Image: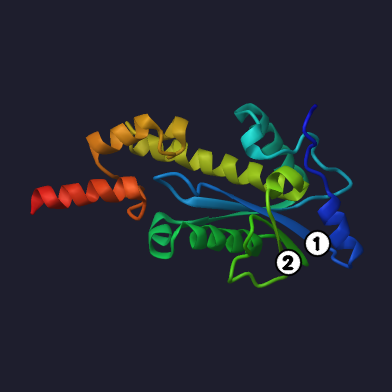
Amino acid sequence: MTAALPDCSLERAAMARGARIVAGVDEAGRGPLAGPVTAAAVVLDLRRIPAGLNDSKKLTSARRLALADRIMASCDWAVGHASVEEIDRLNILRAAHLAMCRALAGLARRPCLALIDGNMLPRDLDLPGEAVVGGDARCASIAAASILAKTVRDRIMVDLAQQHPGYGWEANAGYPTPAHQQALIALGPTPHHRRSFAPVHKILCKDQSASS
């Protein structure tokens, strides 16, 4: 049996309650050892929803890219980032929430409601929000945001891979694959590695012990 695709029931329910502009919000990049965390906010035009929207993790790279182009052409959308420095200072959850707030602030029109993937709302959210557990698999707006966030972040990591070859970021997007972790040990951390993440922190501690 084929799993159901995300739909617009949450958006339509919000509009039935009086909301005029409903944004879906999701992030990409909470798990990697390197690079920013990226969030996207998307306001779908419910009269012309791109066909095939789904959780970005369930789509091929080619399908994500094609859908990202359609989303950007037909929707109000914006992307926000939190830097490696902010991730290390705030923690990854708070940094992801900061990126979400930045994405919402970048929309052309202020939403009446933000549908946020996950079980928590950002504490600095300055508009009404609803946390949606598993939202990227349930809610079309959140699925669209997941596609944009992943697509934009992957492109950032491809660019960073050209500046810092050897870690495989063009393929692993900074996630802790065995090859990435082996390169981290062999080459050491870059300025784009998250010092607060255990695999990076352990290497830095070893380096400090060796030099003291």
Is 90 situated left or right of 124 in this image?
A: left
**Residue shown at 46% from the left, 30% from the top:** 171
Circle number at residue 110 = 2
Location of residue 67 in the rendering, given as x and y in whole percent from the top left corner: 71, 36
Q: Within 10 angstroms of label 2, few (less than 14), some, or many (20 or more) residues?
A: some
The colour scheme applied to this rendered structure is rainbow
Q: State whether residue 71 is above or below residue 179.
A: below
Q: Quadrant of residue 100?
A: bottom right
Work out which quarter of the rendered image holds the C terminus and state it: bottom left
> In the rendering, at what x and y percent does residue 121 appear?
63, 64
Q: Is residue 60 left or right of residue 206?
A: right
Q: Image point 56% across, 43% down: which residue?
A: 152
The crowd level at tag 1 (other Cα within 10 Å; few <14, some 14-19, many 20+) is some
Q: Amino acid at mark 2?
A: Arg
205 and 35: which is toward the camera: 205
Q: Residue furthest left?
A: 212
Q: Which amino acid, by three-letter code, is at mark 1? A: Ile
Marks 1 and 2, the one that precedes in the sequence = 1
Residue at image position (53%, 57%) is 96
- Seen in the picture, residue 129 relative to 136 is either above or below; the reply is below
- Residue 118 at x, y percent in the picture: 64, 55
User: Toward which corner of the image does residue 120 lie, by quadrant?
Assistant: bottom right
Q: Quadrant of the N terminus?
A: top right
Say if 70 sits above or below 18 in the image.
above
Q: Secondary structure at mark 1?
A: loop
Between the C-alphas of marks 1 and 2, the distance is 7 Å
The residue that disc 1 covers is 21
Which residue reaches farthest right? 16
Q: Secondary structure at mark 2?
A: loop
* Residue 114 pos. (x, y %): 72, 62
Q: Is residue 206 left or right of residue 119?
A: left
Does the CB distance between marks 1 and 2 fall below 8 Å? yes
